[in-house]
Image (spheres, grey):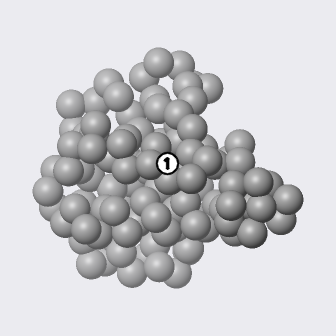
Amino acid sequence: MTRDELLTICLGLPGAEETYPFGEEVAVMKVGGKMFALVPLSEEAESVNLKCDPGRALELRQAYPGILPGHHQDKRHWNTVALDGSVEDDVVRGLVADSYDLVLSGLPRGVREELGAG
C-alpha cells in the first residue's frame, strides 16, 4: 500500500479530516477533532502511526516485523506500521478502521451522532 492509498482510505471514513498541526511534513488524520492516524510525508520509508488497544498492539508487534511501537507517541497506545509490503494491505486497512473506531468510541455521544455513528 502506498502513502497516497492510505491517505485516501483515511479520508474515506465518515467525518475524517486531514490536518497539519505539526507542520507540512506530517498529515494528521482526525475524527471529531481527535487523531486516529499520523502519516509522515517526508520520510523515504513510508509508514503510518495508528492508535490501538494496548493488548492488541503487543500481539501485532509480535506477529508482524513491520509493526513497531509508535514513533514519537505513547508506545502503549500507538503502533507505527510500515507501508513497505511487510504488512498486508488488508491488515493495514483493518488497522486504520480499528484506530478510527477506537477514537470514535471515545468521542461524546453528540459528536458521534453528528458523524452518523450514534
Query: Where residue 42 sits in the image (x, y, percent)?
Result: 32, 24
Location of residue 62 by image quarter: bottom left
How many neighbours does mark 1 have within 10 angstroms: few (below 14), some (14-19), or many (20 or more)? many
Depth check: give the residue in front, 70 or 95.
95
Location of residue 64 by image quarter: bottom left
> Which residue is painted at 19% across and 66% down in the image?
88
> Which residue is painted at 55% across and 60% down in the image?
100
Query: Where residue 99 sits in the image (x, y, percent)?
Result: 52, 62
Query: Where residue 45 sits in the image (x, y, percent)?
Result: 22, 38
> Which residue is painted at 47% across and 18% down in the image?
24
For residue 39, side relative to residue 103 (left or right): left
Q: Secondary structure at mark 1?
A: strand
Q: What quarter of the picture does the C terminus occupy?
A: bottom right
User: Residue tagged by mark 1?
Assistant: 37
Query: Where residue 43 sits in the image (x, y, percent)?
Result: 28, 30
> Which residue is painted at 52% across and 81% down in the image?
55
